Image (cartoon, grey):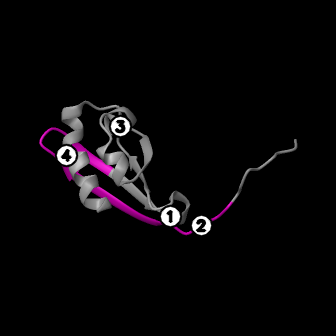
């Protein structure tokens, strides 16, 4: 079978694992930094198996984190606060 690859690169990344308890939820995250994301980071929610490439502008976008991580606005407050600190 012939494959047409758009790319097949190997790149060193910096990975940070963070777990913190909020008022309502526990957050278990893996944060990957790479040159591939043009200054943004890949944030994986380990508990729910959801991920997104996020930059400071994405954190401030109304409804974005709620949509990506499939959580309510109330559940995303502490995650948004953490990501603001991380990305600034």
Disc 1 crowd, CA 10 A, few/some/many (<14, 14-19, 20+)? some
Location of the C terminus (image quadrant): bottom left
Q: CA distance from mark 4 to mark 1?
A: 24 Å
Say which mark, if any, is on residue 34. 1
Position above or below: 34 against 20? below
Mark 3 or 4: in front is: 3
Residue at (87, 41) in percent of width and height: 1
Which one is earlier in the sequence, the residue at label 4 or at label 1? 1
Residue ID for mark 2: 11
Q: Which residue is mark 3?
A: 64
Task: Give the quadrant of residue 61.
Answer: top left
Residue 79 rendering spot, x and y as whole percentages: 25, 46
Say if mark 2 contacts mark 1, CB within 8 Å. Answer: yes
Residue found at x 53% / y 65%: 35
| Disc nearer the start of the sequence (3/4) | 3
Closer to the N terminus: mark 2 or mark 1? 2
Separation (CA) of disc 2 from disc 4: 31 Å
Whether the residues at callouts 2 and 3 have beta carbons within 8 Å, the answer is: no
Q: Which residues are magenta?
A: 9-28
Mark 2 Cα shell of 10 Å, populated few (<14), some (14-19), many (≥20): few
Q: Position of residue 80 (x, y in %)?
A: 25, 47
Labelled pair 3, 1 in contact (Cβ < 8 Å): no
Q: Which residue is mark 4?
A: 78
Gap in angstroms between the C-alphas marked 2 and 1 = 8 Å
Judge from the rendering whether residue 49 lies leftward or rightward of residue 12; answer left or right: left
Q: Is residue 11 left or right of residue 1?
A: left
Where residue 3 appears, as percent x and y from the top left, is 82, 45
């Amino acid at each position: 079978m012939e494959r047409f690859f758009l790319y097949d690169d190997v790149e060193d990344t910096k990975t940070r694992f963070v777990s913190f308890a909020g008022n309502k939820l526990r957050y278990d995250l893996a944060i990957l930094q790479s040159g591939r994301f043009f200054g943004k980071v890949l944030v994986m929610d380990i508990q729910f198996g959801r991920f997104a490439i996020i930059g400071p502008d994405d954190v401030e976008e109304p409804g974005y984190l709620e949509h990506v991580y499939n959580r309510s606005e109330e559940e995303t407050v502490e995650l948004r606060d953490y990501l603001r600190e991380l990305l600034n």
